[in-house]
Image (cartoon, rainbow, N blue to C red):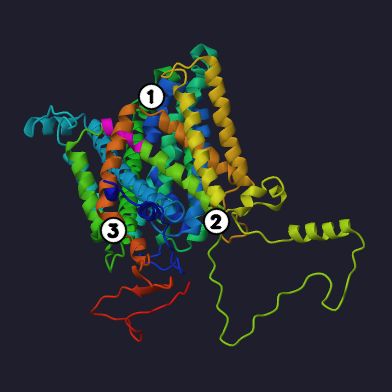
Amino acid sequence: MARWLPRSADLTRFCQKLNRVKTLEDDMMETSFNRCLSTIDLTLLGIGGMVGSGLYVLTGTVAKEIAGPAVIVSFIIAGFASLLAALCYAEFGARVPKTGSAYMFTYVSVGEIWAFLIGWNVLLEYMIGGAAVARAWSGYLDSIFNHKIKNFTETHVGAWQVPFLAHYPDFLAAAILLVATAFISFGAKVSSWLNHVFSAISMGVILFILIMGFVLAQPKNWSVQEGGFAPYGLSGIMAGTATCFYAFVGFDVIAASSEEARNPQRAVPRAIAFSLGLATGAYILVSVVLTLMVPWHTLDPDSALADAFYRRGYAWAGFLVAAGSICAMNTVLLSNLFSLPRIVYAMAEDGLFFQVFSRVHPRTQVPVVGIVVFGLLMALLALVFDLEALVQFLSIGTLLAYTFVAASIIVLRFQQQKVDAPAPAAGSQPSPEPREGPSAGELKEYESFSDKLQLVDRDKSKEHREPGQLKAAFEPYLEFLSDFYPGEVVTVAVVTLMVSAVCLCSILVFGNTHLHLPTWSYSLLLVLFSLGFLLSLLLIWAHEQQHGTQTFQIPLVPLSPALSIVLNIYLMLKLSYMTWLRFAVWLLLGLLVYFGYGIWHSKENLREPRPQRVSARYVVFPSGSLEERVQAVQPSSQPAAGLPDTDTEDCKR
């Protein structure tokens, strides 16, 4: 029975395979894509991904049902929380200008299996997101024509009453996805130009809404008679923040497009900052004018802006709002169809996904196979499936990606930079190290032992420390940590920080409701896990990190990524248990794909050196001496060139 159990060496090698990181090329600007996107192109892609139908629907829903006019504060807090995640993406996008977004960032810093699971979840997120937006686009257009499209389809095609399927096939949603797929397959420049057109129309409509809204604003709608500014209190504001946070999830399209940017080191951070700032400003200002035009408790959650203009006597403005909403949804569709094939391409290029998706069209320079296949899958989802039950699934994949990207920032910042030193020329002598202080011929005496101690301390403080090593100021107190490899303690501390964050957020979310903890144990657990989180943070901060890189760096590391990790985990735990159940099923499917295909075809697996088998024979002589004969096992048909068949070494004892 014992012989069937895996050996410890095999288990160690297997774990190393799961956690191996991606080896980056020397020239990261080299690509098979067309680097044609400017900062403006990337900014408009980000705005298109964030300012979608949520601006026309989400603002009214949160204002009426969750936060009241204080939805403004909810958007401010949500914008700041999104900024923490966006800055992490900006640093990675500038340092690693390769397509793949969160998948690529996790692969180069954390490990292979984690990167695959992130990419696997992002795939489903984009597919469901694109199909859901297409159905919303279809429903919005159908409502303008008084639901004639729906009635015609149900009459001539029929209605279904099957669980998880739509009530009727939505041919309009499938058609718009197929048309968008065709445009995306023409190349990044065509996609960018089309996004420019729709974004310009959408921003023009938003500008019209703001101007007309402030003209029609009535400050009395925030008065106490109408319920006040924050009728649901602080809890309503925070609940609204959790909902508003998902309005900003589209900025990762910029990171996914970094391999097609002309100057990604500058363009990616600027585009993320500009697009997030403009999107946050649009959401805040539209929320202001919406709650000032009509009382918040009378809003129509389904079409708040159009209904507000209609009730103020400007019914014609409703058509402009509808046009802006459709254009905004078009930009979200383009954003999803633009990002998804590129993430699939990155996974296939690394060997973790099926190789056919790594093919790039020689003329358009886009992964056309991935665009067509996943465009058809999106169209199929939009055609027959009821996506309302699956829409909440989108948030968990996004939040998980944000969490791993934030953790990857900490790990990467405290790793040593891989710089290949040039080898000295043959026969050359190594140049002498420059001397500091007195010259070789100059002698200096130190009269006392304390003078010598001061000299040692001064030399030790001048010692250059690599990233990941303990800071000199903390070495007297944490000397036992100096024996670890640079970055090893930081990696363990990051894992401890994430475990502490999960436990802390679990107590906050479930402590009083599901676990029914008494007050003393609730407070004690909060204190313990908070201390674990803070100690992990301090331990990371006690180590040296990379400085002076030429690309953008997020400030206040490790504090900023740690706050992002806590926020993302808290929001994930607020999701329903059905979302977690679907997430677990999808993860299991992903693990089957990884262990059935990805782990064997990974390019990092091909780079690993093959272990050489060695056989040993022992001969014991009567005198007690021992001869060990070691023979490298070579294939019989291919003996090693220039070497005898066996190498013999006699060891006398």
Q: Hey, which residue is sitting farthest left in the picture?
A: 156
Amino acid at the residue labelled 3 = Trp
x 50%, y 21%: residue? 235
Horizontal and vertical percent position of residue 468? 59, 54
Magenta span of residues: 389-395
User: How many badges with numbers are in the image?
Assistant: 3
Q: Is residue 219 left or right of residue 115?
A: right
- Predominant SS along the magenta part: helix
Name the residue tied to disc 2: 415
* Mark 3 to mark 2 CA distance (whole Å): 28 Å
* Lower sequence index among marks 3 and 2: 2
Give how far across and how far down residue 564 sits, in percent: 51, 39
Above or below, comparing residue 359 to residue 275 in the picture: below
The residue to which callout 1 is attached is 313
Q: The residue under label 2 is which amino acid type?
A: Gln
Indicate which disc residue 600 carries.
Answer: 3
Residue 566 shows up from this direction: yes
Is 391 inside the magenta-drawn segment? yes
**Residue for point 52% across, 40% down:** 496
Three-letter amino acid code of the residue under disc 1: Gly
